[in-house]
């Protein structure tokens, strides 16, 4: 089955590990749609979240290959697990805005619970986090004003603690 | 001079590009501290933000090599520019919390303008964005409760629109 897979990979924080992990996907022709990696609260351990669209079976082979790499401590494919996850993206987005349009854009930002990170006489920078659907919806609202620049941070995903799920902010926001 | 460099790299959204870019840093022994990559609003173009500590001169050579790669459209080292940037991280953090501790932890989250992404009988998941300093300060406050898991999304950075700078949320939060 074809779908988007969300991998969680714990690795040694060491030069070359990222290139090897990314290389394993590209060697099989997979294009990484988004990736984020940063240090964890454990020294020398980094955590990656990798989003790759592709076939379940082939990506399961990639997962097994990844888990055999020396510097890889743990690999999970969240998409193949029954457990629910929280999946967020951080986006910075600069929109064209003069004094007249500014308040309209700030209103849109408020609806999406976004924050204003910067403003200039002819632009405004918005910081927003959320699910991909929410971010796409915000882009759609902002694009008539002219999006000058957008930086998406890649997905950050984590399995929910227990089954005692709450409605998170997505359910309440637009 | 040794310092942390923040690279902005615009690339073709194509299999293998990420591995080549990461490989260029590791070939020279640099360890990527954090990286985020995702699609932009332009089709087939991805944007990376890469944080690497290292020597100014050698990293300037790496920047030049990067700009020569076929699939690389633009490279900038924000740390070497006079222009001010907005630099944010997204973090998901799961903290041990029973019913007694929950309100204390929610109070800390509110101070840092964080959001509650999930809750279970014995844990709480917090979603926060901000500068590295803010995130470290929050971790310090939460660690006595027991941090079960933390996922950092890598830096997302963007040059400010003009010199008409506003106090951003960092200045107001704790």
Image (spheres, coloured by chain):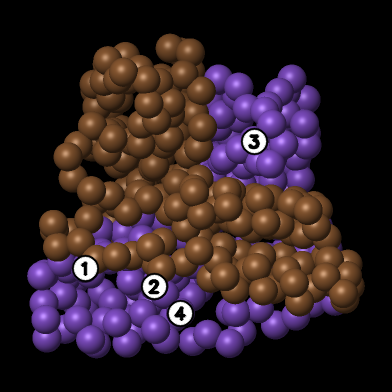
Chain colours: A purple, B brown
Q: Are marks 4 and 2 in contact (CB under 8 Å)?
A: no
Q: Residue at x 46, y 79 (%)?
A: A113
* Side (left or right) of B173 relative to B62: right
Q: Are marks 4 and 3 in contact (CB under 8 Å)?
A: no
Residue A46 got which mark?
A: 3
Q: CA distance from mark 1 to mark 4?
A: 17 Å
In the displayed structure, A12 sits above or below B167; it is: above
Which label sits on residue A115? 2
Asked if residue B96 is positioned above or below residue A31 in the image, the reply reads below
- Discs 3, 1: same chain: yes
Q: Residue at x 35, y 36 (%)?
A: B6
Label 1 environment density (alpha carbons within 10 Å; few <14, some 14–19, many ≥20):
many
Badge 2 marks a residue whose secondary structure is strand
Return the x and y of residue B90 as percentages of the image width and height.
Answer: 53, 56
Give the alpha-carbon distance from disc 4 to disc 3, as whole Å.
30 Å
Residues under labels 3 and 2: Cα distance?
28 Å
Query: Disc 2 and disc 1: Cα gap in Å?
Result: 11 Å
Question: Under tag 4, what secondary structure?
Answer: loop
């Amino acid at each position: 089955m074809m779908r988007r897979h969300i991998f969680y990979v714990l690795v040694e924080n060491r030069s070359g590990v990222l290139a090897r992990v990314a290389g394993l996907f590209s060697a099989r022709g997979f294009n990484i749609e988004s990736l984020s990696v940063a240090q964890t609260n454990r020294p020398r351990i980094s955590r990656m979240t990798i989003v790759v669209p592709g076939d379940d079976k082939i990506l399961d082979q990639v997962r097994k290959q990844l888990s055999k790499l020396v510097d890889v401590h743990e690999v999970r494919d969240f998409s193949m697990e029954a457990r629910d996850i929280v999946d967020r993206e951080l986006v910075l987005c600069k929109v064209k805005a003069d004094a007249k349009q500014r308040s309209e854009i700030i209103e849109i930002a408020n609806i999406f619970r976004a924050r204003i990170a910067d403003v200039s006489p002819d632009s405004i920078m918005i910081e927003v986090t959320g699910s991909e659907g929410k971010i796409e919806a915000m882009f759609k609202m902002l694009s008539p004003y002219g999006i000058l620049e957008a930086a998406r941070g890649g997905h950050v995903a984590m399995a929910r603690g227990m089954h005692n799920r709450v409605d998170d902010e997505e359910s309440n926001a637009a």
